[in-house]
Amino acid sequence: MNTTRVWFTRMRVMTSKELMQLLRDTILIIFTIYAFTFDIYWAGSGVSLSLNNASLMVFDGDSSYASRELTSRFREPYFQNVGTLNRSSETIENLDSGKAMVTLDIPEGFEQSLLRGEQSTVQMQVDTTNTVLGLLASSYGQQIAGRYGMEVAMKQQGLSPDGGISGPVLDDRHRIWFNPNQKDSWFMSIAELLTIITVFSMMLPAAAMVREKERGTIEQLLVSPLSAFQVMFSKVLAMTLVIVLLTAISLFLVIGGVFGVPFKGSPWLFLGLATLYVFTTSGLGLVIATFSRNMAQAGMLIILLIAPMIFLSGAWTPPEAMPTVMRWLMLVSPLHYFIDAGYAVLLKGATFTSLAPQILGMSVLGGLNFSLGLWRFRRQFG
């Protein structure tokens, strides 16, 4: 009984020491608070995955009612008409210079072809330097031109666009779940929070360990009655408390308060998952610390690991769109499990039971990471 009490007393004292050392680092505290508040706000309010005000230039070689009607349908919020072209040859020049993202070339005789019931073509050229926005602009343009062509054809047949067709008709109705208004701020703010948690759950434990090595105090700890597990786990425990506290502030103050994200599931379940995830990735931070001699090396190694973790998380590219090898590699990315679980809890209302695969994946990876860090620590200082 006394041995157990002594063990927990040492853990409490060591955890308090780690918290006090962290609080004394003013620059790191300011940076951490900024990352969990303002950085998430900038990401949620400033990053958009939708097509907004794509610059459009039009060459209207027909100058007719039909050409003006088609042009008028390329309007805000998706397109913004920034000018007209005098010659068809100017389209490439304006795309190359970046003055226009989309150019629309309407040939002479466009309206006459429609009136005769003949097929008529318009040329739409899109700058796809940004493939996502280029694909969206092309898709929206096809829908606008296709809808206009359908209306003209139905009008010539004496049918109104909203009905008049006998026989079976497909009534296409959409219902959007989990983010009905398709607000990018909901997705981006949560994605940024998960990324920030990943960065700091690796950086703070690694910084705590490397700081001990730089100051030479790690040897003092090793000659004390503390075990290697107590030395390492106390750092993980202290940094986990700080990160989970800041995560709660960001969740309720920024994501819920500023962006108005309605939590469909329990935010406390999300914080529980965040605690498990911080433990999972902090093991990687400790492994990095055993290979680093100073903070600069630790920072470079963390960047080296963070980039592939984000690419393999599925936050930016759906797993279904990745090659088979990349999908297998996603299984060893703890961020992949955390993103699935985080969005499922906050936006879909998932429960603890339904998240069993993600929890199991993070637990297994966390155990392996911490065991590897402990093995490296004992081998380096044992």
Image: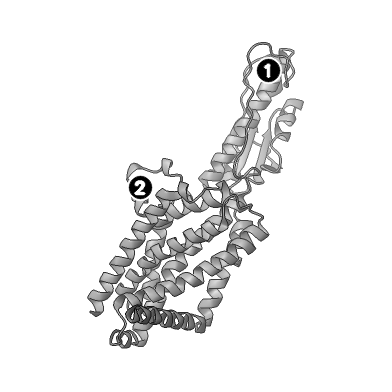
- Asked whether residue 46 is in view, the answer is no
Q: Position of residue 303 (x, y in %)?
A: 40, 65
CA gap between label 1 and label 2 equals 47 Å
| Quadrant of the rendering where the N terminus is positioned | bottom left
Tell me what residue is drawn at x 57 percent, y 40 percent.
Answer: 136
Q: Along the polypeptide, which appears first: circle 1 or circle 2?
A: 1
Tell me what residue is drawn at x 32 percent, y 88 percent.
Answer: 220
Tell me what residue is drawn at x 39 percent, y 76 percent.
Answer: 234
| Quadrant of the rendering where the C terminus is positioned | bottom left
CB atoms of marks 1 and 2 within 8 Å: no
Taking depth in this image into account, of 95 and 185 the one nearest to the observer is: 185
Q: Which residue lies furthest to the right in this view?
A: 65
Label 1 Cα crowd, 10 Å radius (few <14 / some 14-19 / many 20+): some
Tell me what residue is drawn at x 57 percent, y 65 percent.
Answer: 248
Label ID, residue 153: 1
Question: Which residue was labeled with disc 2?
Answer: 326
Q: Where is residue 257 in the image (x, y as percent from the top left)?
A: 67, 60
Seen in the image, is 158 located left or right of residue 201? Answer: right
The three-letter amino acid code for the residue at tag 2 is Met
Taking depth in this image into account, of 161 and 313 the one nearest to the observer is: 313
- Asked whether residue 38 is in view, the answer is yes
Label ID, residue 197: none
Q: The residue tagged with tag 2: helix, strand or loop? A: helix
The three-letter amino acid code for the residue at tag 1 is Ala
Q: The residue tagged with tag 1: helix, strand or loop? A: helix
Quarter residue 325 falls in? top left
Quarter residue 7 falls in? bottom left
Seen in the image, is 207 located left or right of residue 26? Answer: left
